[in-house]
Image (cartoon, rainbow, N blue to C red):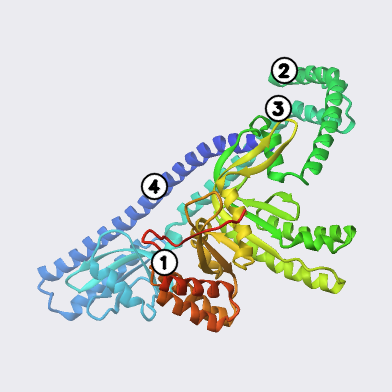
Amino acid sequence: MKIRLKMFLVVLPLIIVPLFLGQTASYFHAVNGVTRLARQLLGFKLSELEKYADNQWALLIDNNFAGSPDMIEAAKKAIELYSRSIVLSDSEIILAVSKTDNSIGMSTSSLHLLQGEENRLMDILLEENKGLHSAVMGGEKRIFQSFYFIPFDWYILISEKEDVFYKDADSITVQTIIIICASSLIAAFLLLLAANSLTSPMRKIVLAMEKIIKTADLSSRVDVEYKDETGLLAQSFNKMTEELDSAYSQIKHYAFDAVIAGKKEERIRQIFQKYVPNDVIERFFASPEKMLVGDNRCLSILFSDIRSFTTISEGMAPDDLVNSLNRYFTGQVDIIYNRNGIVDKYIGDAIMAFWGAPEKHDDDALQSVLSGLEMIDAVNKFNDNQRKLGKCEFHIGIGLNYGEVTVGNIGSERKMDYTVIGDAVNLASRMEGLTKTYHSEILISESLFEELRKRAAEYGLHYRLLDTVAVKGKTKGVRIFTVKKTLTPDEQRAWPLHNQGMKLYYRRSFTEAAVKFKEALSILPGDFNARSLYSRCAEYASNPPPENWNGVEVMKTK
């Protein structure tokens, strides 16, 4: 917003508002005075007319003519003649309206009430309120005052057209508006001249600055026109340009160094994005001193491994093996990153990834499981292409766990990795190893299942409890589950039976559990886990485990 406009917005209201208030006060005072005089004039005429009518009736009483129709008619005629004598304009009308039948008993001018007007007029008269009233008579809006004359049963009215009655007041209104508008225009014009005079030196400074910006010529100066604040501003501007001119060479030097540093930083980012997540790089440049500090938090960890990779590598040429691995890793890693995951490292043919660091999301656990399921689907598509190329197919096992780990840049100043460590990481690795034991493509731990179950229904996930195991190096059992997004019709029937059997199994109801697993086997004849648990239940039914048995199977998986 320009200074001139600001001056208008500030100063002009200071001029116009008092002027407007003064003129408005004068207007209302004049209008009230004119209206009061017009009301008093009507009131005076009405009072005189009422006295005259009372005198005419008194004459009839005094002379015992009150019962004579001819004399009463003569008195009415006298009142009409008197009314005509006090009428001052063609638009003014004095009339009498009969209370009995709403008819006009007397009028100083030809006036015919239109349909509906006489009833609305009579409603106002019957209220018998003193003062001015407004009503439509003969299609014109009129102002009137009235009194009720009992002897003739008349309402006698003195009326005037509304526009004539308020003519002087309207004239004052027009004059007031003209004065306010004219005064505002004159004030705006004078203010414009003053604003131009005040802002002229500043405009010259702006022009000089624009010239400097366009030409980069810091030798431009402005003339000092006044010995006031604007002159002081011009002097300060000239001094500033002198200082800038002397420092310009240093600024160019610093700018050149900054560009070089920026290009180096960008190259570093591009290189390290292949090894370290971009979020980690951003944090490093923001706070380098904090990058060696670890952080404990709950994450979801995934391990994925190609089964029998040694056998596959022995049967493929090195270049074919590398090309196949690169295509496999590309598809798997894209899925992880698309699900907000971080690829921690490649361990030979295995992938380690985690969710929840450096940025934590509410659905990290869910995203990790969905990534695992999509990785399995991606391998199936990868194998379709491998078959077309006549290459070996890959089969993978995926293990996931959810728990507290230490996350951060771990290592030395010469070599470090952004990674996670802790028991939860080890358990995730064990879960991947158990996929071979339980003939499952994906296994999740009990802690991940509990975290996942909060939103599993939202995505329609289905789970099956497979066992409670104590992996190598641990004595406490962990329940393990497999999970799918979509079940076949047979699986939709068999999985609930399997889960029911697991509940009976842990209650030591081995015979009933064996029945459930056998039903599941009848639907899925080749199901390894249902068959294994059926055999285990049959064995326990004959040779029950010890009393302290808690359903834990000790595994030897590394």
Residue ID for mark 3: 198
Which of the two residues, 494 or 307, is positioned nearer the viewer here? 307
- Mark nearest the camera among 3 and 2 is 2
Comes first in the chain, label 3 or label 4: 4
Classify mark 3: residues with Cα within 10 Å, few (<14), some (14-19) or many (20+). some
Work out whether 490 lies above or below 31.
Answer: below
Residue for point 32% across, 70% down:
95
Residue ID for mark 2: 232
- Mark nearest the camera among 4 and 1 is 1
Comes first in the chain, label 1 or label 2: 2
Q: Could you tell me residue 360's position as x and y percent?
A: 58, 48
User: What mark, if any, has residue 33 been given in the picture?
Assistant: 4
Q: Is residue 14 left or right of residue 104?
A: right
Which amino acid, by three-letter code, is at mark 2?
A: Leu
Which amino acid, by three-letter code, is at mark 4?
A: Gly
Mark 3 and mark 2: Cα distance apart in space: 13 Å
Which amino acid, by three-letter code, is at mark 3?
A: Leu
Comes first in the chain, label 4 or label 1: 4
Mark 3 and mark 1: Cα distance apart in space: 92 Å
Comes first in the chain, label 3 or label 2: 3
